[in-house]
Amino acid sequence: MARTLEASRPRGDRKVGVIWHTQGSGKSLLMAFYAGQVIRHPAMANPTLVVLTDRNDLDEQLFTTFSRSHDLLRQAPVRAESREELQALLTRPSGGVVFTTIQKFVSPAGQETYPALTDRRNVVVMADEAHRSQYGFRAHLDRKSGEISYGFAKHLRDALPNASFIGFPGTPISRPGSPTSATRSAATTSRAGCATRRTRSSW
């Protein structure tokens, strides 16, 4: 929690960090407990939490866990069923636990950047399976069409320019050249099936 407060302050770096989990170590519950702490802390001033997944089945599973934690969260989580609903939920003045898949952060047709939805600093993005989806910050040039594109992770940060980010990766795919291999090797401390790390990444 201390790191969250530091990251979200006016001159904070917005990088809360990463909590690594092995399979069956209680990641969903830990995410709910963390969300409850952030919501209850007075310094966060009624924050908005964005719970990010990369698959609909994971979104459903995690949403169920959070829905059963109403007393902890002091509110009912909501799911963004469309890009339009996501934008409406994230332009709110305060509060809320918003579930969405990262694929909804696709830039409008003909635009390289995603429009900013809020500039508040008391927004915390919690990315489930962060080792799979948080790439694409650099421009990609299509040599055939000449079009430049970016990944969803960049569009997410364009939409929430002052939000802080915490990643909850699971066991990554390990194969030569995979970016998740480098991510896994960066883990520095571990306890009870979890590892925390701080690197020069966006987390």
Image (spheres, rainbow, N blue to C red):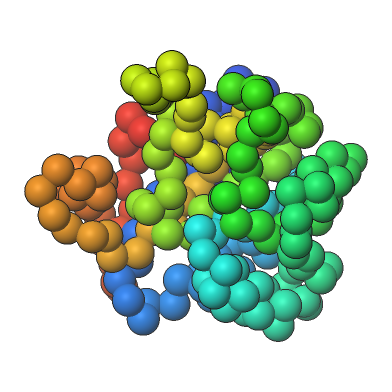
Q: Is residue 40 left or right of residue 153?
A: right
Tell me what residue is drawn at x 78 percent, y 77 percent.
71
Query: Above or below — where is 54 with respect to 63?
Result: above
x then y, percent, for residue 162: 66, 29
Q: Nearer the viewer, residue 132 or 169?
A: 132
Q: Is residue 64 left or right of residue 169?
A: right
Q: Nearer the viewer, residue 105 or 52?
A: 105
Tell me what residue is drawn at x 62 percent, y 75 percent.
60
Q: Visible in this render: residue 21?
A: yes
Furthest residue in direction top, as rendered: 146
Furthest residue in direction front, as rendered: 144
**Residue 200 quadrant:** top left
Q: How many tags in the picture?
A: 0
x then y, percent, for residue 127: 52, 53
Q: Nearer the viewer, residue 83 or 17?
A: 83
**Residue 66 quadrant:** bottom right
**Residue 171 quadrant:** bottom left
x then y, percent, for residue 187: 24, 50
